[in-house]
Image (spheres, grey):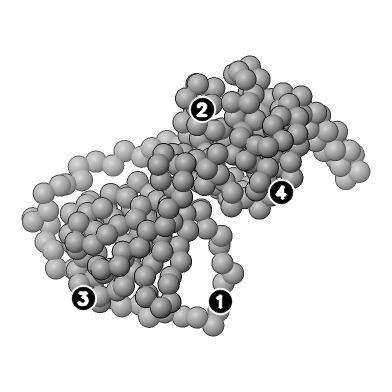
Amino acid sequence: MLRDYRNEPYTKALTDLVNTYQPEILMLGATTLGRDLAGSVATTLGTGLVADCTELLIDTETRNLASTRPTFGGSLLCTIMTQRHRPQMATVRPRVMAMPEPDATRSGEIVEVPFSMIETSIITKVLEFIPDDTRDKPNLPFADIIVSGGRGLKNQENFRHVWDLAKVLGAEVGASRPVVQAGWAELDRQVGQSGKTVRPKLYIAAGISGAIQHRVGMDGADLIIAINTDPNAPIFDFAHYGIVGNATTVLPALTEAFKAHLAQAKKTG
């Protein structure tokens, strides 16, 4: 009954668990299914829900969960607390937080709970499952290296420099929202609040100003290199390294430099 996701039985199962064990906090992933389920559970329980959080903290005095998320079209970050209702619910964007080190000293109890709902009482039925073929789709959230381009590249022809560098580095190609809206890159490559959240080892941002909409999707990268003609661009405030220059000139230079380095490394074994 719970093998395939359906909103109705999953909502009942989760609300029954909450009503039985009375947790103070309930969190779900801000995935497609997680967003659907969280809204239904919060409505059924009559509690608040903070969606697409990028940071979570707990006030030790009040035991309130402080959930931070982008607001006003991504131009600001706001912190929200559910003070009068329990459980406090939040959905968290995948890959937005660092993976903690394993702690072998901690353990938890697994409690098996019977599910009382019967199949005939569920309105929706799964008739067929058609898998989504994603073999040729970009998979930015799990890429180790991402080269992203913004509207500072001026046009689609110049955006090819991003592809050239990404090919040499074995990287994924990302893009800012204006680039996707202009049709220079597909939606699956958009990084930011309304796109993908990524946490690569290396993120190269070329011609991207660093507005909060983009920042919330990539500032968890281990190393950020920014290229921008404006020395006062917001991205330089949080990039680890910055190059003040024209991305259409810097990107080809980096591509050739990496090609030469890789060729030399191959020669020396």
Give the amino acid type for the residue marked by disc 1 in the picture. Asp
Examine the image and state in which quarter residue 172 appears: top right
Left or right of residue 262, residue 138 in this image: left
Whichever of callouts 1 and 4 sits on the residue coming sooner in the sequence is: 1
Q: Secondary structure at mark 1?
A: loop
Give the amino acid type for the residue marked by disc 4 in the picture. His
Residue 157 appears at what percent x and percent y?
Answer: 63, 16
Examine the image and state in which quarter residue 162 appears: top right
Q: Residue at left 52%, top 43%?
A: 212
Whichever of callouts 4 and 3 sits on the residue coming sooner in the sequence is: 3
> Mark 3 sits on what residue?
20
> Mark 2 sits on what residue?
178
Examine the image and state in which quarter residue 174 appears: top right
Q: Are marks 1 and 4 in contact (CB under 8 Å)?
A: no
Q: Secondary structure at mark 4?
A: loop
Task: Tell me the CA gap for discs 3 and 1.
Answer: 29 Å
Query: Label for residue 146?
Result: none
Query: Label for residue 240?
Result: 4
